[in-house]
Amino acid sequence: MQSFDHSLPMRLYRALNAVMPRFRALFTAHGLTEPQWRVLRVLWEREEVPFRELAALTLLPAPSLVGVVDRLQTAGLVVRRRPPSDRRQALVRATARGRALEQDVMPAVERIYAELRASLDAGTYAGLVAGLDALAANAAAPDTTQHARRAAATNTAGE
């Protein structure tokens, strides 16, 4: 068994603790929390997003997202609307004020990314990004090994 210090979760936490303080300081300087930032970042890339999709994209549970969107709406950064065709659905979009914030924040975000990329050689950075993407994709995929074992056991039992 790997030591606690060398476990994957601890390595990920250390990396996160090395990266996020820069971003959190930027968010705080603009009166935003990290979850609020995630919501705005998605809305800056898309015109209007269904609430459920916004929860999935930001990795925020729907009950938590309600409060985040409420606070952003109170601050005048987003609006919610219910389409007449399906009043059960809520759509969220950034307001003009919310979109203007993008112009203030994104140059600093790009500088932080440039600093992070410069802290590693290009191959290591690209490998890190690819590895994290692969890990997330594989972890989200159904366990095909377990499914294959069950299928094999079923086939063997029937013989």
Image (cartoon, rainbow, N blue to C red):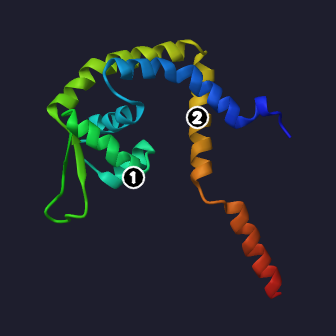
In the image, 144 versus 29, the foreground residue is 29
**Residue lying at 21% horizontally and 37% vertically, measured from the top left:** 74
**Residue sitting at the far right:** 1
Q: Mark 2 points at which residue?
A: 130
Of helix, strand and loop, which one carries label 2?
A: helix
Quadrant of residue 34 in the image?
top left
Q: Residues within 10 Å of mark 1 (few under 14, many from 20)?
A: some
**Left or right: where 80 falls relative to 155:** left
Of helix, strand and loop, which one carries label 1?
A: helix
Which residue type does callout 2 highlight? Ala
**Left or right: where 84 falls relative to 44:** left
Rounded to the nearest whole Å, what is the CA distance between mark 1 and mark 2? 28 Å
**Residue sitting at the far bottom:** 158
**Left or right: where 86 falls relative to 34:** left
**Residue lying at 52% horizontally and 17% vertically, measured from the top left:** 116
Q: Mark 1 points at which residue?
A: 62
Q: Earlier in the sequence, mark 1 or mark 2?
A: 1
**Residue lying at 57% horizontally and 13% vertically, measured from the top left:** 119
Q: Quadrant of the N terminus?
A: top right
Which residue type does callout 1 highlight? Ala
**Left or right: where 94 falls relative to 107:** left
